[in-house]
Image (tube, grey):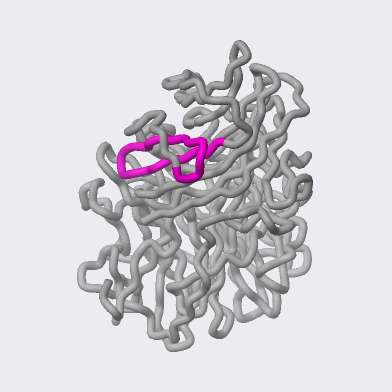
């Protein structure tokens, strides 16, 4: 890497739909999290390059009922804004199907690290990807996506605007359609953000869907609720004209910020695919420089107009934070921020106190093959090449009990390497779940011992699974298992791969548990 450049992505791994705001010389960013809890991870930076996670917007189970959403539902694209001493996150909770129930709500905090308030749901706010704009006259505006009732073509969506009461954050006045997709024959318009500059209200949207035609487009108007002029250079950012196997693809869904030095930067999502158009890391957060051109429209401010692996640094003092810990020893009262469960646990299925220095997972009837809250604690796969290892102590009592390590795309697609029992003998099995059908693809009898070391090595197109009875022992269970099973393309999903610890009693009651001494993840 050159001295005056930084590397994309800013946030590797499943951190899509970034939204950013600046408060003096501090920058804050939030991304979507779908069904994972805690939800809406929040990051802080001083230089726009190095980011530390400081909290989550949804961090108490009672804040929000995920309603047993499937993996690509839940918390969709958020927007973070700051106004008059308060931080606001507006977000869409999607349930009962991807185009079924869409509830839009606002949470607030005086400290972006939290705590965040209980949600205020906005009555009548349909659609997705809602955003807030605080105008100079004190008015507050809501913008969001809608599905056109005309449905003139597939993906006929648009953007609407409605003023909010600043006290109740409820709609007041009439609804304005400020960009109907038929005007430009645009598909799946979403992710609106409004900015005001030089007397213009600028509307930025995502367009083209969430795959190869994804893009960033703009329009503008002299009044916030008037007739918006479409940017003649749309899309202002897109890789739709590039091969899908370009190192960076599927660029779109953006937000922008200025710096205290007058520069402008755009954060947006993109993917890093491999052969077969697959990407296991999900949609990640990238950043590019932008500039307001002489004609008043925004444009990419680099040599090729693309999102690149290397970009020049912002003109900001460097501020480096400690990296995300590679190894979790479970010695604190709470899990580190990179850990998530699937849905908020209504009853806690793990403990850090029952055996200090260990994560204890309780066996429960729920399994990864269901839309539920299984006994799973995981973190994002953030690198194409990585190694994840854990030390587990578990003695099965019944043949229904198992525990180990799992790699999860969603309830229908995952791998799990688990210890179980059959006919009084202990077995290590590798399970493949495809379209919610689970099959054992490799098994080996293992010796009677309380502790076993489990390891997964990931590379571009495959995973290899190892085990050992000593920490430095690596015995091969199976190698080069097809990684495309966990690609977002396979399930048309919006999330990336999670890897973590798992225990289940497979639809039977159990009082057993598995203890994990540590979990180590290293990537390159």
31 sits to left or right of 371: left
Q: Position of residue 356 (x, y in %)?
A: 74, 51
Apparent side of residue 134 relative to residue 326 in the rendered image (left or right): right
Task: Specify whether residue 128 is in view.
Answer: no
Where is 99 relative to 506, above or below? below
The residue nearer to you, when weighing 524 against 412, is 524
The residue positioned 56% from the left and 72% from the top of the image is 44
Which segment did they paint magenta? 452-472
The answer to whether residue 371 shows anywhere in this view is yes
Query: Magenta region's main secondary structure?
Result: strand
Residue 457 position in % (x across, y down) = 39, 42
Name the quadrant of the C terminus. bottom left
Residue in front for this viewpoint, 500 or 453: 453
The number of discs equals: 0
* Residue 32: x %, y % from top left: 55, 53
Whether residue 460 sits left or right of residue 343 in the image: it is left
State which quarter of the image contains the N terminus.
bottom left
Q: Quadrant of residue 377?
A: top right
Q: Residue at x 35, y 64 (%)?
A: 8
62 or 367: which is nearer to us? Answer: 367
Q: Residue at x 70, y 30 (%)?
A: 363
Q: Is residue 324 magenta?
A: no
Residue 100 picture quarter:
top right
Q: Quadrant of residue 300?
A: bottom left
Q: Residue furthest top?
A: 423
- Residue plotted at (29% across, 79% down): 3
């Amino acid at each position: 890497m050159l001295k005056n450049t930084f590397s994309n992505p800013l946030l590797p791994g499943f951190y899509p739909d970034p939204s950013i705001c600046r408060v003096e010389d501090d920058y804050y960013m939030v991304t979507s999290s779908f069904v994972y809890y805690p939800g809406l991870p929040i990051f802080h930076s001083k230089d726009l390059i190095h980011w530390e996670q400081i909290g989550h917007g949804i961090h108490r189970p009672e804040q929000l009922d995920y309603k047993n959403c499937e993996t690509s539902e839940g918390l969709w694209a958020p927007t973070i804004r700051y106004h008059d001493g308060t931080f606001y996150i507006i977000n869409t909770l999607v349930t009962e199907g991807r185009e079924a129930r869409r509830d839009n709500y606002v949470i607030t905090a005086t400290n972006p690290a939290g705590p965040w308030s209980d949600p205020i749901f906005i009555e009548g706010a349909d659609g997705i990807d809602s955003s807030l704009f605080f105008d100079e006259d004190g008015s507050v505006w809501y913008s969001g996506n809608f599905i056109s009732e005309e449905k003139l073509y597939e993906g006929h969506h648009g953007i609407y605007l409605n003023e909010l009461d600043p006290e109740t954050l409820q709609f007041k006045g009439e609804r304005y359609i400020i960009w109907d997709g038929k005007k430009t024959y645009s598909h799946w318009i979403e992710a609106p953000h409004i900015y005001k500059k030089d007397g213009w209200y600028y509307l930025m949207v995502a367009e083209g869907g969430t795959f190869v035609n994804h893009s960033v487009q703009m329009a503008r108007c002299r009044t916030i609720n008037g007739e918006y002029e479409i940017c003649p250079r749309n899309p202002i950012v897109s890789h739709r004209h590039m091969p899908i196997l370009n190192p960076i693809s599927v660029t779109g869904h953006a937000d922008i910020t200025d710096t205290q030095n007058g520069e402008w930067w755009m954060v947006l999502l993109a993917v890093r695919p491999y052969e077969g158009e697959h990407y296991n890391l999900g949609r990640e957060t990238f950043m590019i420089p932008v500039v307001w051109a002489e004609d008043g429209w925004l444009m990419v401010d680099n040599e090729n107009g693309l999102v690149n692996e290397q970009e020049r640094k912002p003109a900001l003092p460097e501020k480096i934070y400690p990296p995300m810990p590679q190894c979790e020893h479970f010695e604190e009262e709470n899990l580190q921020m990179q850990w998530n469960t699937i849905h908020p646990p209504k009853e806690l299925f793990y403990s850090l106190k029952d055996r200090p220095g260990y994560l204890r997972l309780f066996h429960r009837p729920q399994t990864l093959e269901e839309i539920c809250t299984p006994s799973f604690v995981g973190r994002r796969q953030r690198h194409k090449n990585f190694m994840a290892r854990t030390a587990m102590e578990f003695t099965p009592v019944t043949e229904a009990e198992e525990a180990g390590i799992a790699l999860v795309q969603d309830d229908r697609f995952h791998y799990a390497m688990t210890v179980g029992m059959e006919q009084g003998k202990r077995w290590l099995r590798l399970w493949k779940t495809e379209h919610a059908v689970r099959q054992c693809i490799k098994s080996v009898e293992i010796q009677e011992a309380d502790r076993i070391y489990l390891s997964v090595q990931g590379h571009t197109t495959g995973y290899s699974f190892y085990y050992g009875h000593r920490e430095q022992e690596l015995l091969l269970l199976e190698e080069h298992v097809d990684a495309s099973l966990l690609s977002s393309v396979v399930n048309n999903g919006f999330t990336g791969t999670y890897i973590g610890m798992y225990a289940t009693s497979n639809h039977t009651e159990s009082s057993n548990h598995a203890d994990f001494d540590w979990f180590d993840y290293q990537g390159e």
